[in-house]
Image (tube, rainbow, N blue to C red):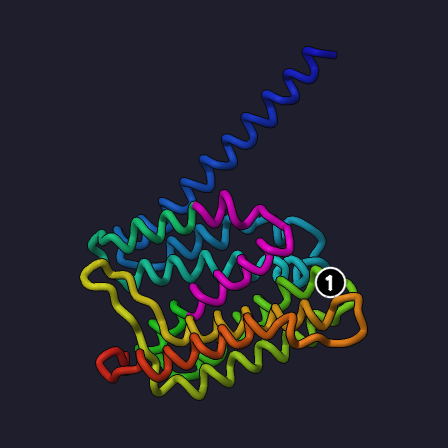
């Protein structure tokens, strides 16, 4: 019996180590190959191939699996596209993206608590919107609008699906439409904040949508509490904080020199 327990623990330890190594390889190779080849195809293929379990079941479950894995796909695809947009010479940003992807795969994605579910959704909004904003400079507004619809739907569904009482799909579709409307309105004035020669850049739209998503989740949590009466004082601080952050971004950090159009 003792030998069986020892073997079982050894196998679990070996499996955990192998899982970490494979995730580190995925993070390094997907970003590194994108820089070396100057193409995002290899990186995207690796990210999508890593989700092979989505289709390793009966086809009736494919749509459900895709919905439940959208946040992970958005993060992986966004990191590859951001690495591609930074150029074919290795910069600080490429190593930052590798580190972010590794941390995501090993420490953040496997967690399923309410806190980490919210964090995962916010990361997907931030990275996905940043990548969509950068690429919208060389495409038309439809690309940004469609991308934001998918991002908004995925982030909302990722959190709301944890509550069996809510209609996560319908509410998430509304959230996706809200994201796409904001993207359409802001497309002609997209602001990017660069950080010197590091290659790191942040989209103003990604900050605004991340803050709005944070406030939305707080309001949702309050409305789904066991008490019948909605208490605004319970969400006043995060809502006011979100409004203040957006006001500062729009008033103080919208100089034309940051406009990517």
- Vertically, is 73 above or below 20? below
Q: Is residue 140 magenta?
A: no
Looking at the rendered structure, the number of numbered marks drawn on it comes to: 1
- Residue 96 place in picture, x, y as percent: 32, 51
- Residue 14 place in picture, x, y as percent: 54, 26
In-front residue for pair 137/1: 1
Q: Residue at x 38, y 78 (%)?
A: 248
Q: Is residue 109 magenta?
A: yes
Q: Residue at x 38, y 58 (%)?
A: 80
Per the image, the residue denoted by label 1 is: 163
Instruction: Tell me the element at label 1.
Output: loop
In-front residue for pair 149/51: 149
- Vertically, is 108 above or below 153? above
In-front residue for pair 104/204: 204
Magenta stretch, main secondary structure, is helix
Instruction: Specify whether 163 is left or right of 176.
Output: right
- Residue 161 place in picture, x, y as percent: 69, 63
* Magenta stretch bounds: 103-129
Give the image quarter of residue 120: bottom right
């Amino acid at each position: 019996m003792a030998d069986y327990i020892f073997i079982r623990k050894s196998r679990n330890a070996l499996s955990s180590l192998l899982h970490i190594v494979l995730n580190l390889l995925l993070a390094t190779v997907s970003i590194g190959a994108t820089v070396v080849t100057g193409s995002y195809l290899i990186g995207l293929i690796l990210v999508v191939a890593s989700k092979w379990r989505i289709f390793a079941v009966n086809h009736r479950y494919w749509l459900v699996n895709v919905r439940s894995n959208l946040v992970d796909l958005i993060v992986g695809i966004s990191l590859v596209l951001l690495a591609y947009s930074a150029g074919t010479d290795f910069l600080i940003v490429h190593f930052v993206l590798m580190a972010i992807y590794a941390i995501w795969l090993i420490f953040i994605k496997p967690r399923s608590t309410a806190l980490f579910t919210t964090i995962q959704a916010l990361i997907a909004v931030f990275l996905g919107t940043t990548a969509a904003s950068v690429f919208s400079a060389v495409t038309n507004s439809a690309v940004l609008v469609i991308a934001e619809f998918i991002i908004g739907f995925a982030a909302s569904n990722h959190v709301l699906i944890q509550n069996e009482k809510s209609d996560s799909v319908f509410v998430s579709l509304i959230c996706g439409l809200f994201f796409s409307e904001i993207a359409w309105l802001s497309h002609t004035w997209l602001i990017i904040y660069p950080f010197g020669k590091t290659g790191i850049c942040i989209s103003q739209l990604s900050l605004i949508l991340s803050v709005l998503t944070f406030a939305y989740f707080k309001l949702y949590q309050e409305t789904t509490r066991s008490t019948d009466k909605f208490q605004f004082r319970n969400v006043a601080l995060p809502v006011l904080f979100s409004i203040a952050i957006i006001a500062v971004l729009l008033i103080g950090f919208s100089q034309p020199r940051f406009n990517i159009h």
